Image: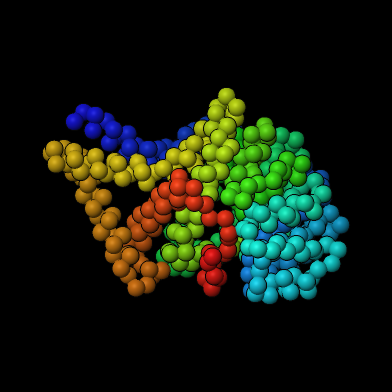
Amino acid sequence: MTFVLLFTLLCLAVPVYVYFGYPAILWVLTRGLPDITHRRGEQKPSVALIISCYNEEGVIRQKLENALELDYPPELLRIIVVSDGSDDGTDEAVKEFENGRIVLVRQEGRLGKTMGINLAMEQVDADITVFSDANAMYARDAISKLARNFADLDVGYAVGAALYTDGDQGASARNENLYWRYELAIKGMESRLHSVVGGDGAIYAIRTELWEPLQQQDINDFVNPLQIIAKGYRGVFDADAKCFEETAGDFDREVARKERIVNRSIRGLMRVGQVMNPAKSGVFAFEVISHKLLRWLIPLFLLTGVAGSVILAFAGIGLFQLISAGAMLMLVLTLVGHLSKNRNQLPVWVATPYYFVMVNGYAVRGIVKALQGQTQVTWSSARPGQEQR
């Protein structure tokens, strides 16, 4: 019984550490550091903005108008739209804008976002490459803010802040917005300590010379930054480089997106596993293990911890009786949420546990599929009204 007790406590301690202990440790380690721990400059390197899309006719015109309104010098900014076999009129919409500054690259065969980026990168000769999605609308100075970080020669990638415009509209959006604000705070502390873990497909930039082609199964905004870390560079977060987008707006779409991200990311981390070696990547190994690997494994720790708690509860230990009761309450509230006809209007006391349980449950599915060698390579928007393939 002693072994069951200790193992259960360990399994329950991991989620507490990941969600609360890790941010607390980051806060302590960065408390005496300046807000910016790398050099910034006002130089204007040449930039290629790559916009990935699949069937985005509804927003691509707005995105291109947004890109043309950026305050970056026009002669230094080239815009490349890569269409992954779109068949809804996206390509025709881009051709309305196509000129010396805007180029359409069409990928046939629906090969996925990563392969589309590989194809687009063959045409890039700029100093800096910025990656974006069709629905991410940039603040006018977003690229200028990203570019300033590369004045520090140790910086290999820079990540901006993707902010939600509908964060208060519906239970799903509120939960996702709250989670994302928590993530942005962690990104800022990680950046000050060493490097922000991973990029953001909506807004991140790299030194073009550090690019290396990705495998089809790779999730580009995670594996690409890891490759850059493995080369000895830093990745920084710039909260002033902003873009704006909508949440998935729906619980089912959101948890499916989480499954896809975990499914591809855990495989990617294993492929660039050297970044988890402190002897090679220093404190970044602590960051990536705590922020990503352990977080993805939280559902497994929770399941084991709850199972152990039930055993210990039957042994009469009061603490674990409370934990077991709490777990049962979470499951009941999750069931209430699941059976609800309008999940997007759930009260917070149901929506939050439902969101937590469903996200972690789908993360397990993503891990299992990755272990089985199943990786989702195609990509499409999780926004309402967009077909999921």
Residue sitting at x 69%, y 63%: 108
In the picture as drawn, the residue positioned furthest to the top comes out as 279
Q: Residue at image x 54%, y 40%? A: 269
- State whether residue 264 appears in this view: yes
Task: Count the marks.
Answer: 0
Q: Is residue 264 above or below residue 336?
A: above
Q: Looking at the figure, which quarter contains the C terminus?
A: bottom right
The coloring applied to the image is rainbow
37 lies above or below 260: above
Quarter the N terminus occupies: top left
**Viewer-proximal residue, 80 or 23?**
80
- Front residue of 37 and 112: 112
The location of residue 335, given as percent across then percent down, is: 29, 62
Q: Is residue 30 left or right of residue 303?
A: right
Quadrant in which residue 107 is drawn: bottom right
**Residue 92 image position (x, y, % from top left):** 74, 74
What residue is drawn where x is 32% and y is 62%? 350
Q: Could you tell whether 81 is left or right of 178 in the image?
A: right
Res 318 seen here: no
Question: Residue 84: image x %, image y %?
Answer: 66, 63
- The picture places residue 157, in percent across and down from the top left corner, at 68, 43
Quarter of the rendering containing residue 158: top right
Residue drawn at 32 percent across, 39 percent down: 12
Q: Is residue 90 above or below residue 29?
A: below
